[in-house]
Amino acid sequence: MAITTRTDLERLDREDPLAAFRDEFFLPDGIIYLDGNSLGAMPREAAQRARQVVEKEWAIGLIGSMNTAGWYALPVTLGRKIAALVGAKPNEVVLTDSTGINLYKVLAAALQMQPERRVIVMEGSNFPTNNYMVQGLVAQLGDGYTIRFAEADEIMAAIDEDVAAICITHVHYKTGNILDMAAITERAHSVGAAAVWDLCHSAGAMPVDLNGCNVDFAVACTYKYLNGGPGSPALLFAAERHHGEYLQPLTGWFGHAEPFAFERDYRPAHDVRQMLSGTQPVVSLSLAEIGIDIMLRADLQAIREKSMRMTDLFIELVEQRCGDHNIALLSPRQAERRGSQVSLYHEEGYPIVRAMHDRGVICDYRAPGNMRFGFAPLYIRYVDVWDAVDRLQDVLQTGAWKKPEYRERAAVT
Amino acid sequence: MAITTRTDLERLDREDPLAAFRDEFFLPDGIIYLDGNSLGAMPREAAQRARQVVEKEWAIGLIGSMNTAGWYALPVTLGRKIAALVGAKPNEVVLTDSTGINLYKVLAAALQMQPERRVIVMEGSNFPTNNYMVQGLVAQLGDGYTIRFAEADEIMAAIDEDVAAICITHVHYKTGNILDMAAITERAHSVGAAAVWDLCHSAGAMPVDLNGCNVDFAVACTYKYLNGGPGSPALLFAAERHHGEYLQPLTGWFGHAEPFAFERDYRPAHDVRQMLSGTQPVVSLSLAEIGIDIMLRADLQAIREKSMRMTDLFIELVEQRCGDHNIALLSPRQAERRGSQVSLYHEEGYPIVRAMHDRGVICDYRAPGNMRFGFAPLYIRYVDVWDAVDRLQDVLQTGAWKKPEYRERAAVT
């Protein structure tokens, strides 16, 4: 499709079957928020829910809300809901703790499937906290455990009969490159290795079919495309066939067969609850339900189609309008291989991103030179794609990014 | 002191130097809340803070709030504050994750101090999730690690030169019995063992002097006497002398020396940040600050004195007025040995607690027969002690607890 004017994109917005979802989110005036891949926007109802949980459930219900407001069961009840978004059965998912801690739990369980093997395959360039957590586990286990790092096109070859488990992130945080979950999982299983997947940049951004791919364990955060709120507790998936077979080691009372029997010794629950450890941050966890409920009303296939179209358009317009400014595409050009973000390289990416912020376009930066633009299909419009490129062109043509203050690094970038 | 009338207690309230703090908490009309030992009441300002975090920091500030609202630094900034409440230096404490997960982290670090030893001493009757977490760690470490369970008066003798670490809870969740942190830690150190303490039922209820006792590592929850909100993230203390020496194994990016360098391999921070793992539930974590700030304005010695006086009075009045009803005291009689709760035994404790709830007194039950009455000195008044005993006497004298529906167990008790 040749896009020549903003009017073309207004038409796409009018025809967009997801257009109505935008009204369910609060978006600040004058901001084009292209960082939903870091933190999703606030669903308007989340503000109401926060008041409910704090001012009613906590203030008035007090400890009784454990039962009456369902606090105690939240990791399981929200897990049952979110399961549909990742191709899992309701009894295979819980919401709890952080992504990293959940990764530690499930990988420790997965390694029990091949107790004689010592190799874990990971994509070293992907989000490093996964490497770090696995390095911690490997150091703790000792006994010859090791990580075999392989980049995207080396992964299949790296999976041989020494491999106990693969621990791979579905969509790359820097480039948006999608790995083939079905093929890699099949390869892992063909040599008897367990398959552990991280869905941080895919859950809520595209259909994910954990059971269709026969995945063993998975984790995901809920605060990116699932709009659960800052640091909302993470998703943990354990395939039903492994329940009661392979145990995670952070064995707290929420994972006990009878938590309120207060027995001295641990007896594991024989279902997904074994993946739980302790008391959860109820306010943050409750808020996550709002984003999940919205997503359950959306069609993930429509989300994916809009996502591919928006990112295609973004690339097309950037190349049309900013082609003279030493920008290179870091994301895959084929939409099918790309998540819901576009990463552009520019040597001076950091000050350019800062200049974009000043013009109301929130994107982010990952060294070296990587400018990330995330397109969350529930609340980003096609015209936002146009306007973002418009401002990028302006920043590049005018050299606005050259202001000295744009080079100063924020504490967290 | 002989208390004969409610008027005597009204006088104590008038003279109470902490009396004004009650107004800072929301307490539902007609409720006497004696379960602050499970979940502290809501500070009124927490409602305001929740709106701030959700409706401003998240909705408007979006990802920028990582810096501008200090989200990223919250585990450290709140740790610096809370340190003063437990006798720690500001750089020795973080707020993060759950108590159980923090216990796992610090014990794994503590065991590195005596790598040749294999015994961990615990009080088996105390809150079982600690046993469970340590059992998970022991199972994972293998290699002969074992837990030596010892009850209160057996602990000193159980600490010998086979012991790598003690992992002990300061105040007993069922009885309120206080263990002698100084003496037990000294005994542990005298045989070369590390001392790990759990302060769940003491932090905010009494002065705690971790450095005065030379404790190595400690954990505590923040949602009981610290009024942080349901499931608010937990306290973790690591003595400065161990920073950079003994590492916890849940090595996420928040514990990396340079989290935003996104390096492939883990490099530990050489300070208390190494105890952090991943992204925290920001809304729940932010709310915890309100309770901490209130507590920092209170005098912990005054809190302790009021606590001892209230629990003394409660015991005295129960024995005066309910002495004919087969009730026994499970808590230590000496106030100095007792935390901020009184536990009473009655064979029919469960329906009695339910009948008390119906009369507006929120206490709780732990099988077998243990009725727990917690007295949070910041918001419980001396007259509440009188009124609670009044209703207990009524429930017992009238046999009101014999209604069949009081025997039905709630899902969570």
Image (cartoon, coloured by chain):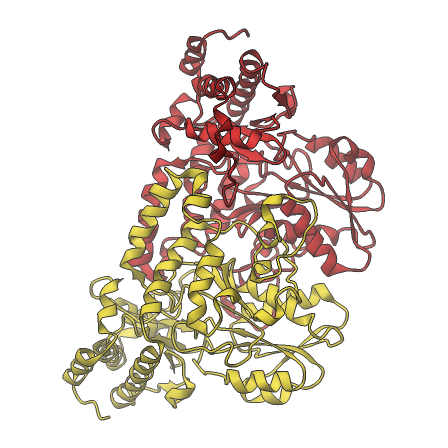
Chain colours: A red, B yellow
Q: Residue B147, image x and y in percent?
A: 66, 76
Furthest residue to the right?
Answer: A161
Q: Is residue A42 left or right of residue B321?
A: right
Q: Which is more toward the observer, B26 or B402?
A: B26
Q: Is residue A264 left or right of residue B202?
A: right
Q: Which is more toward the observer, B144 or B167?
A: B167
Q: Residue A188, image x and y in percent?
A: 77, 39
| Residue at 41 percent of width and 84 percent of height | B338
| Residue at 58 percent of width and 29 percent of height | A348
| Residue at 32 percent of width and 65 percent of height | B294
Furthest residue to the front?
Answer: A404
Residue A150 location, quadrant: top right
Q: Residue A344, image x and y in percent?
A: 60, 25
Image quadrant holding the C terminus of chain B, namely bottom left
Q: Is residue A56 left or right of residue A43?
A: left
Image quadrant holding the N terminus of chain B, namely bottom left
Q: Work out whether residue A243 can be spotted.
A: no
Furthest residue to the left?
Answer: B7
Residue B248 location, quadrant: bottom right
Q: Which is more toward the observer, B175 or B57?
A: B57
Q: Work out whether residue B365 can be spotted.
A: yes
Q: Residue B192, image x and y in percent?
A: 67, 82
Q: Is residue A68 left or right of residue A227?
A: left
Q: In the image, is residue A60 above or below residue B386? A: above
| Residue at 40 percent of width and 27 percent of height | A21
